[in-house]
Image (tube, grey):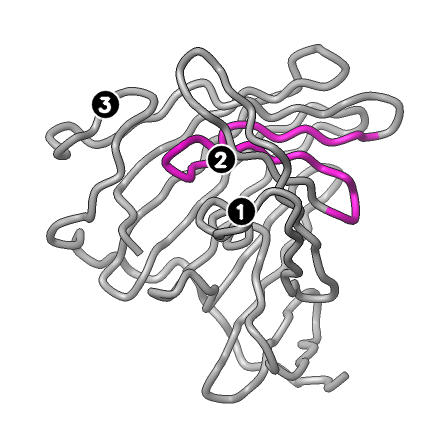
Amino acid sequence: MGWVPLTLRYALRYAGRPAGEQRIVLEPKREGLRVVLEATVELPPPKTRQRWESELDVRGLPRRYRERVEGNGARVMEVEFSLEDGLVTVSQGKEDLAIPYLTDMHDPLSLILALGRVGLQVGEVRRFELVGGRVYAERLPDQRTEEQVLRVYRLRPGLSLLYFDEEGYPLRLTQKVGEHVFEVERVAVEAPIGLAGAKQEASSRVVAGEPPKERKPAFRYRRRRRRYA
């Protein structure tokens, strides 16, 4: 996929006021990419801590996804995408729900990265399948800043606007939440010291060299009774 190790840092705002912070970590692997999003969101109410984690194959499609949200209690969801079994298994609570894996599907993190590389023309719309729904992405006219040209996509449902830099990394997101606008704005790009072509903000994308040493998988799945939809 040509990804390099990066950490993308974001500031969150709601109604023009600070509402937390977020970071996205990209870790290239021999078999694909590991993506981790961690956020502290201070929207009323309550304040939440979120961690999303996705393991992608070389095509950018998810193999496993895990989401944990802590606020008033904790909520954990795990999803396993199995081409071999032809099933997508969603684990939340005491039971598993298995649905047929009939077409390419995305989780929230893989969708963001896919949009950064999709080749849509202005005005063109593409449908992306998600677990339990779908998203329509429409390419809007580019926006020019003093530094670069931004690609803009409108997502439905929800009418979010997602902005990407020239390298295909997410730069900004805006979405109407309640009576106000929720904004996610990138404030920094960090790359490992010594990475060829890497620099703070607007760092060049290059094909990673030798993949980093494999870590113990972050996902732990246990076999439970499946309920078929």
Q: Which residue is mark 3?
A: 199
Q: Quadrant of the N terminus?
A: bottom left
* Left/right of residue 124 with respect to residue 165 in the rendered view: right
Residue drawn at the location 75% of the way across and 48% of the way down: 156
The front one of 195 and 226 is 195
Q: Which of marks 1 and 3 precedes in the sequence?
A: 1
Provide residue 197's location: percent of width, then percent of height. 16, 30
The front one of 78 and 104 is 104
Q: Which residue is mark 1?
A: 112
Q: Which of marks 3 and 2 precedes in the sequence?
A: 2
Provide residue 91's location: percent of width, then percent of height. 64, 69
Where residue 32 sits, quadrant-wise, is: bottom left
Provide residue 165's location: percent of width, then percent of height. 44, 30
Residue drawn at the location 46% of the way across and 64% of the way down: 61
- Residue 165 among those drawn in magenta: yes
* Left/right of residue 55 with respect to residue 138 in the rendered view: left
Residue drawn at the location 38% of the way across and 39% of the way down: 25
Provide residue 20's location: percent of width, then percent of height. 61, 21
The residue stretch that appears in magenta: 156-177
- For the view shown, which residue lies furthest in the right direction? 179
Q: Are marks 2 and 1 in contact (CB under 8 Å)?
A: yes
Q: Which residue is mark 2?
A: 170
Determine the secondary structure under disc 3: loop
Q: Please, what is the three-letter code of the amino acid marked with disc 2?
A: Pro
Determine the secondary structure under disc 2: strand
Residue drawn at the location 73% of the way across and 31% of the way down: 175
Above/below status of 101 relative to 66: below
Q: Please, what is the three-letter code of the amino acid marked with disc 3?
A: Lys
